[in-house]
Image (cartoon, rainbow, N blue to C red):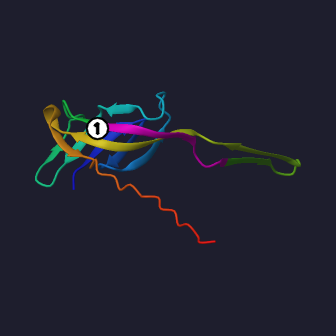
Amino acid sequence: MTFAVINTGGKQYKVSTNDKLRIEKLSDQVGKAVEFNQVLLINDNQNMELGSPLIDGAKVEAKIVKQTKNKTILIFKKRRRHNSRRKNGHRQKVSVVQITKIFGKGGKLLSEVNKTENKKVKTTIKKKT
């Protein structure tokens, strides 16, 4: 199983093809392709490449699936013995991306999403009246 470790939004993610991740909000629109050039590690079944700190020419391509918000984080502040309370919430904006391709050192394609999609056939049953 081929996987890579990428750096985006100040965090590191272990990704493989067809994975969906929630990352810090990207400014692109839904359906657009995105490239992550900060690849720290690539592992296919035979070899493991470790960058110092990055691997030259390696990249990971993804498609933006959805722009949304994370769960609400509650902020509660209380001052003892003063009858003072504040309750606030925050929802961080995130982008949901699906990993489509992983390229190795020098731009060599290591892994790709299968293009075959199972399309459901809609059938209708007519009742006799």
Q: Position of residue 68 (x, y in %)?
A: 56, 41
Task: Name the one closer to the observer, 31 or 110.
Answer: 31
Task: Name the one closer to the observer, 50 or 30.
Answer: 30
Q: Position of residue 109 (x, y in %)?
A: 17, 39
Of all residues, the one furthest to the right in this rendering is 83
Left/right placement of residue 22 relative to residue 117 reads right
- Please say whether residue 64 is one of the residues in the magenta stretch: yes
Task: Name the one closer to the observer, 37 or 73.
Answer: 37
- Please say whether residue 114 is one of the residues in the magenta stretch: no
- Amino acid at circle 1: Val
Q: Which of the image's four quarters has the C terminus?
A: bottom right
Q: Secondary structure at mark 1?
A: strand
Which residue is labeled 1 in the image?
60
Report the magenta stretch's main SS: strand
Left/right placement of residue 46 relative to residue 70 reads left
Q: Which residues are magenta?
A: 61-73
Q: Position of residue 67 (x, y in %)?
A: 53, 38
- Label 1 Cα crowd, 10 Å radius (few <14 / some 14-19 / many 20+): many
Q: Position of residue 127 (x, y in %)?
A: 59, 70
